[in-house]
Image (spheres, rainbow, N blue to C red):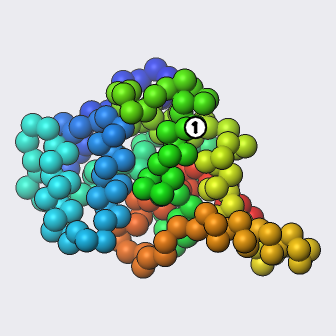
Amino acid sequence: MNILTDHCPDEVTVDGRSYKIVTDWKDWVRFYCMLDDPDLRDRDREYIAMQYFTESEPTDSDEAMKALIKFASGEDMPQAGKSNKQAVTKKAACFSWLYDGAFVLSAFRQYYGIDLRTEKMHWYIFLSLFQGIPDDSPLKKRMQLRTTNGSSIKDREHRQNIIKAQNAVALPQKELGEKDICENIFDAFFSDGGD
């Protein structure tokens, strides 16, 4: 898919059949938050996820969930240098929609003049703009800081400063599970690895 010339998808394929889905960026941020909600059980997540289908729902909820996760991660969008997205599934998260939301709002306002509170846009357009946020923005600096390997820094004072800064922006730790694959693929798109 070419983000510049092709129509952004409004459906996913489940068991060889196409199903229409919601595409607004706000819905997909909510999708990530739903996946990350520790108070929800898997069957609750599946029930909520099925609401993302706008006309009819697939009968195979496991395959439907996989298709939605694939869409949410933007896996179909071409990414230079990201040939093996699955290889990052064990990587610690460098981003959270919940904890970094204010920085996303600020970055879109600062760099694009877009007020996300009122803007409607397709999820893939949103992802493209998100990826284009400059590396020197506060949002991307936080993401890079979270992935920096402090133990590889030789200078003791600099290492302590980095570790202190990392603690200030650290995300709550959680057990990585099957649902985290979506978030880790997303992180791989928007992180340079920090090493």
> At which x and y percent is residue 34?
29, 58
50 to the left or right of 7: left
- At 18% from the left edge and 36% from the top edge, which residue is drawn? 20
Which sits in the foreground, 186 or 173? Answer: 173
Q: Which residue is mark 1?
A: 107
Residue 86 spot, x, y in % from top left: 48, 63
Q: Residue at x 43, y 32 (%)?
A: 116
Number of numbered callouts drawn: 1
Residue at image coords 31%, 49%? 30
Residue 90: image location, x then y, percent: 51, 73
Residue 73 to residue 18: above or below:
below
In which quadrant is the C terminus drawn? bottom right
Q: Is residue 105 above or below residue 64?
A: above
- Give the side of residue 125 with respect to residue 162, left or right: left
Can see residue 16? no
In the structure shown, which secondary structural element does the residue marked by tag 1 occupy? helix
Q: Which of the pair 38/80 is nearer the observer?
A: 38
Q: Position of residue 148 (x, y in %)?
A: 71, 66
In which quarter of the view is residue 121 placed?
top left
Residue 58 seen in the current view: yes
Residue at the far top: name it: 5
Relative horizontal placement of residue 34, taking residue 104 as reference (left or right):
left
Vertical comparison of 44 with 78: above or below: below
Q: Is residue 175 left or right of residue 51?
A: right
Other residues around mark 1 within 10 Å, as few (<14) / some (14–19) / many (≥20): many
Amino acid identity at mark 1: Ala
Is 75 or 40 nearer to us in this picture? 40
Position of the N terminus by quadrant: top left
Q: Quadrant of residue 26?
A: top left
